[in-house]
Amino acid sequence: MRLSTPIPRRFPSTTALPPQLPPPLLLPRPSYRLAAVLAPGSAARRGGLPPPPPSVASAMRRCSRRRRAAPPPAAAAGGGGEVAAPDSQVKRAGTDLKTLATRFWKVAAPYWWSEDKTQARLRLAAVFALTLGTTGISVGFNFLGRDFYNALADKDQEKFTTQLLYYLGAFAGGIPFFVLRDYARETLSLRWRSWMTSYYMKRYFKNRTFYKIQSQSIIDNPDQRINDDLSAFTGTALAFSLTLFNAAVDLVSFSNILYGIYPPLFIVLVVYSLGGTAISVFLGKNLVNLNFMQEKKEADFRYGLVRVRENAESIAFYGGEENELQLLLDRFRRAFENLSELLIASRNLEFFTNGYRYLIQILPAAVVAPMYFSGKIEFGVINQSVSAFNHILSDFSLIVFQFQSISAFSAVIDRLGEFDDLLDGNEPSVSSQRDSIDGINIVFKSSGPSVLSSNGSLTQSDPCMVLEIRNLTLLTPRSGNVLITGLTMELKEKDHLLVMGPSGSGKTSLLRALAGLWTSGTGEIIYHVRGSMRLQKTNSSSDEPSNMNLEGEELLQSSKQRRDNGIFFVPQRPYMVLGTLRQQLLYPTWTEEVHHSPDNDAQNSADRLPFLSEVFPSDGVSAKSEVPTTAELIEVLEVVKLGYILPRFNGLDSMHDWASVLSLGEQQRLAFARLLLATPTLVLLDESTSALDEANEAHLYSQIEAAGITYVSIGHRKTLHKFHNKALYISKSDSTDTNLRSWELKPTDQLPLEESSPFPS
């Protein structure tokens, strides 16, 4: 159950007609009840109108009730990560109105100037036109209602029958406008959300921002912001915009009617609505921050439940059920306490808004009743004045009726704005990367024919060279602890390096630096790429700033660029993607395309959105090799001794939770199968055979060596010595002295067999 969703409450109809008469027959106007979008219990019932169609409103309610949680920021494994402060210690100040407005514009504006801007603007114009039409229809019904009830009061059956036929005809002609308006608004909202989802996801994955967010504990629950907050933002922003537009048109249309009937009634309306707005703002000033915190606390609670599901076996082995229960109940308690405060604030606001709604049932009739008793107006005019009064009062009272919705929407804007600021902050310019002094530079140099550099000189590296490290000093990203100082070495073809050292010394951190995930420190890492085409193609056709330095070397821009230039990484616990066994083997070198049936292609070709099928812009590297055939995939499974899983899981195209159905040893062998299919120049292995027996370990190392792949391994087993010809030992150091050397490099045949440290101190 969605904790922060207020319990639905039934409010009385705000028809201001005398009790003995039925409410006026008006068409529904759902754009006036935005409370149904985010807070269904606070919807304003105006003029006896039925609730809005369930389409957008129900979708938004479902969205807000099932917020999916992403992990709260956690420490990165292996040092350098820092755990976020406990939730109970977090104190968040409210965001001021100016910041909210700035963030709203920053989040909302890009779509309307995007590649889809023509469609977006045309559809928005159509929605506004239909909204204008529905307002005109409402004005027409206002006059029809007046004549209808006059005929009823005069007991004029002939006129009553005529007006009834007019009413039925108006319904037949008017209802399509309301339906089409809602449909056009919903489809535009969906299209806007689709573009924003694609836009934010590309930025989320660009420059490894997703990794920085998680490893450095920057913000909470990024997936909730992409999935739920974007959905809430687009639907609610569009609905609020149309409400404001409709309110402006209503004010013009119905003010003339009401002012023409009785000017003092119009003045009463203005004073009543302005006073109600001021009181609502005062009573509900804490709702924005409480809604923001409720999103976070519920997301944290849900993530705790997801963690139990994903780590069920480990928890069962530890017998940690009581600990998990206590942790989950503690997270739920925090959500409960915040929700209690939220309900108290909502209760105080509802004391006022309920009275505000009840009073308007009699206020307009009470003001114009003396004119009716004196014979100055007909009975139907009372109905007309009540209808006009309710329309205009709802326009003036948007803040009163929608304050809970506005506060919840403000929390969505705040979270998305915070996320957007973070994504912008992780897009440094190429020039700033190039000119940075404090940072590890990673470059690619061609080992093929000479390449013409930007300064006119020819550069060519040693064709046997694979990796160079020059004066590398590695620090932890946040605390600045020195892990490695002044490391200088080179690796040529058929050189295989074993990295050793005690736990916490920085072995995996060195691999992070080699992969470009950590750049804290100084020095240079140079990869020598086979052939020159990958470098020559870089930025050959774009207006982007060049990522070539003055020596004709290519600067690292993305993980894809690193992978496409022949650098591969295999972690200790391989990542199992959501998909088939075939997709497991192809990941990450090839992306299997989604295939559509011919019927679906014909049916959906007009509705397909190009920005949902886009991938990252080309990094300028050479094209991937041809996708392996089914026979090749089966063969590589046999090579890594996993052929037996094909009949076990009914072939390559079966879907399973592979992280659960495969043992860790099987997952590690599957990772080696990916490696053999990709055939990179250099592979970084982080204890990638830790779950394998010695025979399987020896077999896999022999396979990658036979494939001509140079490898760097992290490991503790002495059985690994024979597969490597160089060993780098890193000692553990908590010093901040960058002059203290903590590493030593030797051939593996010089390593002693019995010492705990392979290098004498």
Image: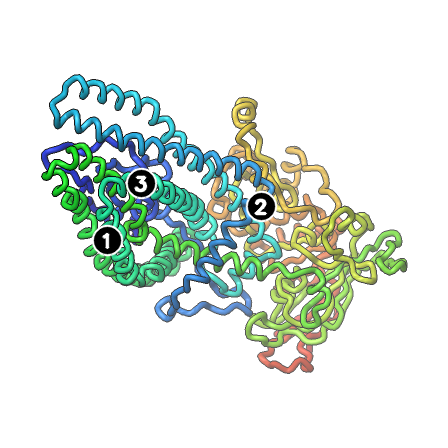
Q: How was the colour assigned to the protein in this rendering? A: rainbow
38 vs 117, left or right, is left
Distance CA(mark 3)–CA(mark 2): 38 Å
- Hey, what amino acid is under mark 1? Tyr
**Label 2: few (<14), some or many (≥20) within 10 Å?**
few
* Residue nearest the viewer, comparing 711 with 78: 78
Residue 434, percent from left and from top: 73, 64
433 is higher (above) or lower (below) than 13: below
**Label 3: few (<14), some or many (≥20) within 10 Å?**
some
Q: Nearer the viewer, mark 1 or mark 3?
A: 3
The reply to whether the C-beta atoms of the residues labelled 1 and 3 are less than 8 Å apart is no
Q: Nearer the viewer, mark 2 or mark 1?
A: 1
Q: Which mark sits nearer the N-terminus, 1 or 3?
A: 3
User: Which label number is shown at residue 113?
Assistant: 2
Distance CA(mark 1)–CA(mark 3): 18 Å
- Hey, what amino acid is under mark 2? Trp
Q: Quadrant of residue 132?
A: top left
- Residue of label 1: 272
Q: Which mark sits nearer the N-terminus, 2 or 1?
A: 2
- Residue of label 3: 256
The reply to whether the C-beta atoms of the residues labelled 2 and 1 are less than 8 Å apart is no
- Hey, what amino acid is under mark 3? Asn
Q: Which mark sits nearer the N-terminus, 3 or 2?
A: 2
161 is higher (above) or lower (below) than 698: above
User: Which residue does the image show at 35% across and 62% down from the upper left?
Assistant: 289
